[in-house]
Image: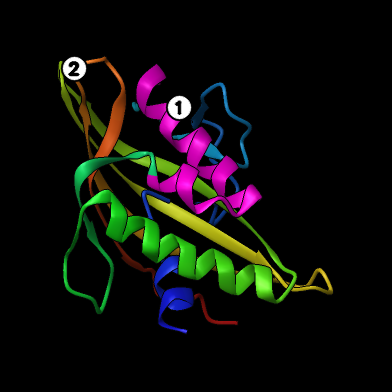
């Protein structure tokens, strides 16, 4: 259950309300990544989010964990800092396995509200929305805020180095 809660709160990663008309979108569909006004697209970073969302749709923990550096720090709420891709893989494996056992599926989307990119280091601040579906197709949605730090490795590939997130308050019904 701990893995389910942790991963539901993940992320890097949103769709709380319809995007403002000023919002920009990258090459991804609007349901995966929204760049708020003033946030420039970045091929390497936007690709991480595309592949992250794809990994969620496929419930593929290895592909999601592969988006993190070997020494990445994963800062899930209520947990100690998890360091290293292997620990991150274990986290996502537990979460995705719990969804598979219930014949469910998952989607995640992101809205980036702040981005800074230098030559080999970047950060994004944003909101994610995670939607999980049970075997009947009934949806459960949760949203949170996140900050990620990405680094570019020697081969030019961008990966998450730090990923921290927490829940957003639930909107009253």
Corner quadrant of residue 9: bottom left
Can you see residue 140? no
Q: Is residue 32 above or below residue 158?
A: below
* Crowding near the residue tagged with mark 1, few <14, some 14–19, many ≥20 C-alpha atoms within 10 Å: some
* Residue 24 drawn at (x, y percent): 50, 27
Closer to the observer: label 2 or label 1? 2
Disc 1 marks which residue? Answer: 47
Residue at the right extreme of this rendering: 136
**Between 171 and 44, which is closer to the camera in this rendering?**
44
Residue at (54%, 48%) from the top-left corner?
Answer: 109
Question: In the rendered view, does 33 fall on the left or right side of 115?
Answer: right
Q: Is residue 166 above or below residue 78?
A: above
* Crowding near the residue tagged with mark 2, few <14, some 14–19, many ≥20 C-alpha atoms within 10 Å: few
Residue at (47%, 84%) from the top-left corner?
Answer: 1
Is label 2 in contact with label 1 (beta carbons under 8 Å)? no
Is residue 63 located in the magenta-colored stretch of the structure?
yes
The colour scheme is rainbow
Give the extent of the magenta segment.
41-65
Residue at (84%, 74%) from the top-left corner?
Answer: 136
* Residue 154 drawn at (x, y percent): 18, 17
Disc 2 marks which residue? Answer: 154
- Dot 2 falls on a residue whose secondary structure is loop
Is residue 88 located in the magenta-colored stretch of the structure?
no
């Amino acid at each position: 259950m701990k893995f389910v809660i942790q991963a539901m709160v993940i992320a890097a990663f949103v769709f709380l309300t319809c995007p403002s008309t000023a919002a920009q979108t990258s090459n991804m569909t609007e349901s995966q990544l929204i760049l708020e006004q003033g946030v420039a697209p970045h091929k390497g970073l936007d690709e991480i989010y595309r592949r992250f969302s794809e990994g969620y749709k496929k419930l593929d923990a290895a592909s999601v964990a592969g988006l993190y550096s070997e020494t990445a720090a994963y800062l899930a709420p209520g947990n100690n800092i998890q360091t290293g891709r292997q620990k991150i893989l274990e986290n996502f494996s537990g979460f995705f396995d719990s969804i598979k056992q219930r014949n469910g599926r998952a989607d995640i989307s992101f809205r980036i509200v702040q981005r800074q990119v230098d030559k080999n280091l970047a950060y994004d601040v944003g909101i994610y929305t995670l939607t999980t579906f049970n075997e009947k197709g009934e949806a459960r949605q949760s949203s949170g805020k996140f900050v990620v730090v990405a680094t570019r490795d020697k081969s030019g590939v961008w990966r998450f180095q730090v990923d921290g997130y927490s829940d957003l308050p639930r909107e009253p019904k």
